Image: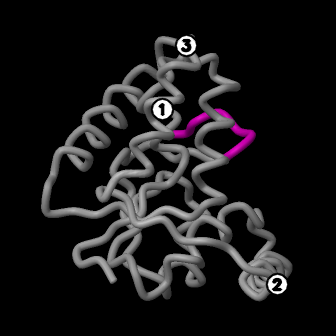
Amino acid sequence: MPTNCILIDSNIWYYAYIIPKKEEFVEIHNKASRFLVEKLADVTLTIGISLYQIAEILELLRKGNLPGNIRQDILESFKTPKFHVVDLDLELIDMAFNKSLLSGIHLYDYLTALPLKGIVSQIFSADDHFQHQHFKSIAQVINPLSPWILREGRLPLK
């Protein structure tokens, strides 16, 4: 089991790599990029990530038109000791589904965080869904892009 392990939500990965077309959102890119570079360079940290989240990040970056060679480098980085990769199983999907039914929060958010319960001590996300008690019971939740709030399918809010 890794020590000093954190989760970095997909929205931070996306904005760290994709420069928004709207000038008003470039601040989000700059904050996310600085944050991600800092965490990746910190040799005392391990980044916990589920197999689901790896696929989600790579797909988000594809949709953002990030070149394939950069996405390939990111995939290769997930295979290094910097990352603690966890698998999903049907029991975990069942738990995520049921929590999603109760809360109305995307199943995807649960598939990102639940596999890392007991492994990560902090969850970094700008998605306000992660402020729900279901996620706070997994680990401390911090928005490193504050005051920005990012939620899938919506424009960023400040």
Residue 94 badge? 2
Q: Which residues are drawn in magenta?
A: 152-158
Locate residue 36, reporting x and y percent. 31, 42
Question: Callout 3, which amino acid?
Answer: Lys
Q: Which quarter of the figure has residue 111?
A: bottom right
Based on the picture, tell me whether residue 121 belongs to the magenta stretch: no
Based on the picture, tell me whether residue 155 belongs to the magenta stretch: yes
Residue 34 vs residue 14: left or right?
A: left
Residue placed most toward the observer, 123 or 51:
51
Crowdedness of circle 2 by 10 Å Cα count: few (<14), some, many (20+)? few
Q: Residue 80, relative to residue 105: is it above or below?
A: above
Q: Residue 104, relative to residue 35: is it above or below?
A: below
Residue 32 badge? none
Residue placed most toward the observer, 151 or 83:
83
Q: Which quarter of the figure has residue 63?
A: top right
The residue to which callout 1 is attached is 15
Marks 1, 3: nearer the viewer: 1
Residue 145 vs residue 37: left or right?
A: right
Locate residue 94, reporting x and y percent. 82, 84
Residue 22 badge? 3
Q: Secondary structure at mark 3?
A: loop
Residue 45 vs residue 105: left or right?
A: left
Going from N to C along the chain, the mark reached first, 3 or 2, is 3
Residue placed most toward the observer, 109 or 2:
2
